[in-house]
Image (tube, helix red, strand yellow):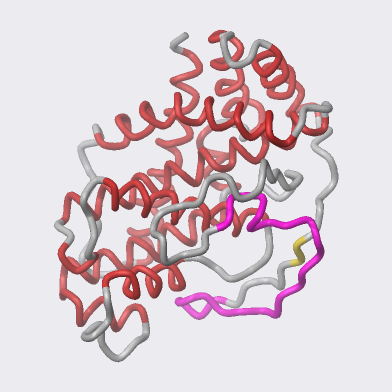
Amino acid sequence: MGTSASYSGPKGTNPLIPAWVDTPLAGEAAATESITTSPTSDPEGIETTPATLESPPPLTTSRLTPLRTAIRTSARAGGSDNGALRAAARHFVGKSMGGSVRGARRMGAARRAGGRLAQAFGALVAGGGAALAQVLRIDSLSGLAANQVWDRLADFVCSDGGSIDEAIVRVAFFQTLRQELDNGLVDLQDANAEQLASFFERFIGECVLERLSQDGGSLLEQNGVSAATAFTHMATLRSLISVHVRQRLAERTERTLPGQFDAGRVDAIVTQTLQDAIAAVGEWGDNG
């Protein structure tokens, strides 16, 4: 969305699995110092704009006022005000994101990353490790350890830019990987279609939840709440919503990723999944 200030939270308190990856938290990936990257090309050959990493303007627009009020109220109650927590989720979708359709359009970095993930997983289902290696632009997966394959996938899916939106995507990827590893998915090449669909859906959901964490955490800090308190509060809200988001995405009738890469179909799948994830956050807020 491009207007959110970087939300850091406390540093170094929540290392992410896998252990071989020194994965930063959302705000650590989007540090406050200014970093400029050169233009890069994504796997489809589309040049991306140079990204400058710096603190954006404060979130002061009127569309964020309801979210700010609900987040502040719930934080003051120490997370015990269920109505305020649900109002925060509801206002995030309805006001901050502008609804699920507009919100999905705004999350361009997540859409692009989701498309690359769907492309990689589709290749794996259709042609195994050899097809996946071709998509990842490496000669072969033979001889690579499981963690090295995940690293190559992360490099393919996640842009190496410095914008907050790109940092959100990268954090979402490794949060998803940590959770799927905990669920028993160790070697990507051994994954079945259901595990790949679950990974894809969880990743899209994590992108949306990380967006909420960034917006809410930034608003809290702008209202004088400490970084540590803001981090803890947003983690609580996120954990409450995430279960509903995963359930709603898993309940959909069409979850199969295409084996043959078709840019139009993949974009439609990613966009619809983003819309469904954003809508699920709003549903959680409405059902209080």
Magenta extent = 24-46
Residues 103 and 248: in front is 248
Q: Position of residue 167 (x, y in %)?
A: 60, 57
Q: Position of residue 228 (x, y in %)?
A: 68, 34
Q: Residue 214, relative to residue 78: is it above or below?
A: below
Left/right placement of residue 100 relative to residue 228 reads: left
Any magenta on residue 36?
yes
Q: Identify the residue at image location x=71%, y=14%.
A: 76
For the image, the number of numbered tags is: 0
Q: Identify the residue at image location x=56%, y=79%.
A: 41
Residue 87 picture quarter = top right
Q: Position of residue 33 (x, y in %)?
A: 81, 61
Q: Residue 281, relative to residue 50: is it above or below?
A: above
Dominant SS type (magenta): loop
Residues 145 and 246: in front is 145
Q: Residue 245, relative to residue 26: is it above or below?
A: above
Any magenta on residue 104?
no
Q: Position of residue 129 (x, y in %)?
A: 20, 77
